[in-house]
């Protein structure tokens, strides 16, 4: 990536301390922090408090509290990280006013401490809208990577209003979903279809090593694996349960943070939940998979996704079986698309039977050009070059 001195403040979509750090805003901040002062603001609370979640709610609350008390710290990736104290009150008119004042006060203090002036302001979390629009800045970037208004337990009206305002005011709105880009680009001041990147060398190089995580030694092969957040609104638990029953001779391994209960999978003898692992360890777990899977629910949220893990699986050289979503259509030459449990199970068996060196090489070749450095350069070129046409990565 070419260095460019622009301080940057990113209102992130996740929490740096508790996410696996693969997310697009985190990956790009690593690149933008080179030679500049960069501040990553951990995700601002968007969801309404839901006490019915029980233990899950308590875990979220404790995690957010620890993040807030961590204060302002510099990460190992070179940028600063800060978690502001905010409240889930976007569904209340007075709450939005209070939220804005609270966030403004905290941001003024942190920006002053870091000596940041006239930065690029990046918004990956729509809840930062009101503060981001009024901050002194050189450019405003809006990261429209998901249908945020479809996120569980948010104020649909409030998030939709934030989204419209950001698209209208941002100097550049970034899309990773061609579905969203085609639907919404005309609503934006300037739009770029970026696609996602991948830490290609990090994932492609692990196959050369012989070491395997200790946990994987006790799991019998073949292994069908998934890494990433394990949430009910993302994964099709009913489909998974049927597939697991159809393939009792196969081990199903989940590596990631559990934020929900997946039907009766805990009771299955051939299912393993290994918990969340540091981002740098994910390739070492992934290389133990014989097949990688993406068993998504069929929802409006999934319709607009472009999961980074797809490119990570392919960089590992692994065969991938997935339920349909629009962005997958560009990869049908190297992945298996399945509708329903029976077809999903058949595709897993086919993937195991067909795998070989030529297919591994083809999968890696498919994603090798999509580095995060290249994506960061494209963003800066489009942001500062008025001749860009917005179709940056097809």
Image (cartoon, rainbow, N blue to C red):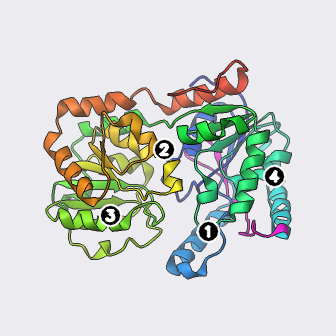
Q: Which mark is residue 239?
A: 3
Element marked by disc 1: loop
- Left or right of 271: which side holds 108? right
Q: Could you classify mark 4 by the number of other residues whose Cα lies within 10 Å: few (under 14), some (14-19), or many (20 or more)?
A: some
Residues at marks 4 and 1, CA–CA distance in whole angstroms: 22 Å
Residues at marks 2 and 4, CA–CA distance in whole angstroms: 28 Å
Q: First in sequence: mark 2 or mark 3?
A: 3
Residue at image coords 53%, 73%: 59
What is the magenta range? 73-93
Q: First in sequence: mark 1 or mark 2?
A: 1
Residues at marks 2 and 3, CA–CA distance in whole angstroms: 21 Å
Answer whether labels 2 and 4 touch (C-beta < 8 Å): no
Percent from the top left, x then y, of residue 350?
17, 46
Q: Could you classify mark 3 by the number of other residues whose Cα lies within 10 Å: few (under 14), some (14-19), or many (20 or more)?
A: some
Answer whether labels 4 and 3 touch (C-beta < 8 Å): no
Element marked by disc 2: loop
């Amino acid at each position: 990536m070419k260095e460019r001195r622009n301080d940057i403040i990113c209102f992130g979509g996740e929490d740096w301390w508790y996410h696996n750090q693969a997310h697009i805003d985190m990956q790009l901040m690593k690149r933008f922090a080179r030679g500049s002062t960069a501040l990553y603001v951990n995700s601002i609370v968007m969801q309404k408090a839901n006490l019915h979640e029980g233990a899950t709610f308590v875990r979220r609350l404790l995690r957010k509290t620890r993040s807030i008390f961590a204060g302002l710290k510099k990460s190992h990736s070179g940028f600063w990280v800060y978690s502001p104290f905010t409240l889930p009150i976007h569904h209340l008119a007075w709450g939005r006013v209070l939220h804005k004042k609270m966030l403004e006060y905290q941001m003024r203090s942190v920006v002053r401490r870091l000596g940041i002036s006239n930065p690029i302001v990046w918004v990956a979390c729509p809840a930062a809208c009101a503060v981001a629009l009024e901050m002194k800045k050189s450019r405003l970037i809006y990261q429209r990577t998901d249908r945020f208004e479809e996120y569980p337990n948010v104020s649909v009206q409030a998030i939709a209003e934030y989204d419209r305002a950001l698209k209208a005011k941002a100097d550049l709105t970034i899309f990773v979903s061609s579905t969203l880009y085609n639907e919404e680009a005309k609503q934006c001041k300037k739009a770029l279809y970026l696609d996602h990147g991948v830490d290609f060398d990090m994932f492609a190089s692990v196959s050369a090593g012989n070491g395997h995580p200790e946990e994987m030694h006790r799991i019998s092969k073949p292994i069908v694996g998934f890494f990433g957040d394990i949430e009910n609104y993302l994964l099709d638990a009913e489909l998974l349960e049927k597939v697991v029953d159809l393939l009792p001779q196969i081990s199903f391994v989940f590596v990631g943070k559990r934020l929900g209960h997946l039907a009766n999978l805990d009771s299955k003898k051939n299912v393993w939940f290994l918990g969340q692992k540091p981002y740098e360890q994910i390739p070492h777990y992934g290389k133990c998979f014989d097949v990688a899977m993406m068993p998504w629910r069929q929802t409006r949220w999934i319709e607009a996704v472009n999961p980074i893990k797809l490119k990570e699986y392919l960089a590992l050289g692994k065969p991938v079986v997935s339920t349909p979503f629009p962005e997958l259509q560009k990869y049908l030459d190297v992945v298996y698309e399945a509708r329903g449990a029976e077809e999903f199970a058949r595709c897993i068996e086919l993937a195991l039977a067909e795998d070989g060196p030529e297919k591994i090489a083809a999968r890696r070749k498919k994603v090798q050009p999509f580095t995060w450095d290249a994506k960061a350069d494209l963003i800066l070129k489009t942001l500062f070059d008025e001749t860009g046409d917005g179709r940056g990565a097809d």
